[in-house]
Amino acid sequence: MGGGIAGLALAHNLRDFDPVVFDRRRFPGKKCTGIISRWTFTRLNVSKEYVDAEFKEIVMRYGNREIHFKVDLLRLNRERLERDLSREVKYYPLTNAEVVSPKEILVRGERLDGTVIKATGWDGKGRKVKAIEMVYEPIDSDVITVILHEENVGGFSWVVPLPDRTLVGALGYGDVFRFVPKLDRRLIEVHGGPIPRCKMREVEGLAIGDVLCSVKTFTGGGIFSISRLIEPIRKSLEGDPRAYEEELRSLRKEINRQYRLVSLAERAWRTSLRLGFSLLDGKTISVGEEFDLHSLLLGRLLH
């Protein structure tokens, strides 16, 4: 249930089980910044044609101070990927499905039997941040820029250069428009929406994606957790539920730790920024699994 990136990526990887995807939306394809690690991309098991760009560096700025990160990241064209994946599986848009049990759903008054996997997305309850992204003409750069500001507590801004366009945006709790970086290029389009910022939830049966609130607390990225649950769900369908249960516990531990760290940083936001950038100004730090496992980043920064 659910035809976003979680449901469609899972269905793509479970094609030999002949999955059926029910989605309330009219059309698949969500606009998203889509920056993921190479490890996450590999786990999705999709074609490289959906990679718009690769990045080896992030520059993080606070005032006139900078920290450089060596990374191995990709920009996934999520919008096009969702549309194409919906064509290769049994995908039913504009369809409301009601869960009766983990083995039964109700669709248009008809009861259907089978293993139910919830990929229904976030229900809008709980804490959230607002995100706005503007698409401009391309700039000559291959470096992601992240900007932190004292007044944008718990948020950040970004500039992501792609070969054919530039993604410029900001997220935070308040008026995020004021933190969107200015770019001297023609504006093409604007999109955005709320992003959950919460601890992971308990969901009966098999589930994947934002329905679990399994997004990285600070950045809001959820594709990494989707990639981690695909293979455990397959093993569960094959009769071994332990892999899914163990991965879910591991994810819950990481997401909840991220949530606590971000909440703590928000309480002393100005102090955290000033202290961190005064200690690390001008330094270059190699980031691997820490891009997904943000709770490890503090140790890397202080190493």
Image (spheres, helix red, strand yellow):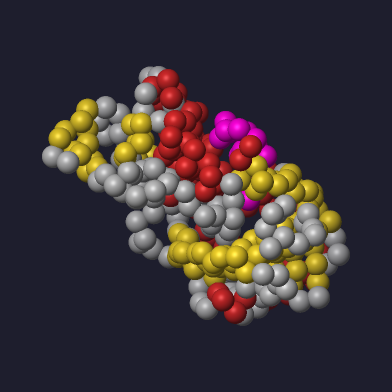
Residue furthest right as drawn = 282
Does 81 sit left or right of 239 as displayed?
Answer: right
Task: Tell which of 203 and 253 is nearer to you.
Answer: 203
Which of 136/105 is in front?
A: 136
Residue 298 placement (x, y as % from top left): 69, 56
Whether residue 93 sits left or right of residue 130 in the image: it is left
**In the rendered structure, which segment of residues is drawn in magenta?**
35-48
- Which residue is located at x 25 percent, y 30 percent? 103
Q: Quadrant of residue 219?
A: bottom right
Percent x, y of residue 17: 38, 22
Q: Magenta includes 65?
A: no
Which quadrant, please, contains the N terminus?
Answer: top left
Is 235 drawn above or below residue 53 in the view shown? above
Could you say where residue 194 lies in the image, as x and y percent from the top left?
45, 64
Dividing the picture into quarters, in which one does residue 137 lie? bottom right
Can residue 280 be seen here? The reply is yes
Tell me if 102 is positioned left or right of 169 in this view: left
Q: How many marks?
A: 0
Foreground of the two, 37 or 288: 37
Q: Quadrant of residue 102?
A: top left
* Residue 269 in the image, given as x and y percentages of width and height: 62, 74
Q: Is residue 269 visible?
A: no
Answer above or below: position of 268 versus 146: below
Q: Residue at x 86, y 64 (%)?
A: 282
Give the residue drawn at x 61%, y 40%.
50
Q: Residue at x 39, y 48 (%)?
A: 27
Q: Vertically, is 157 above or below 120?
A: below
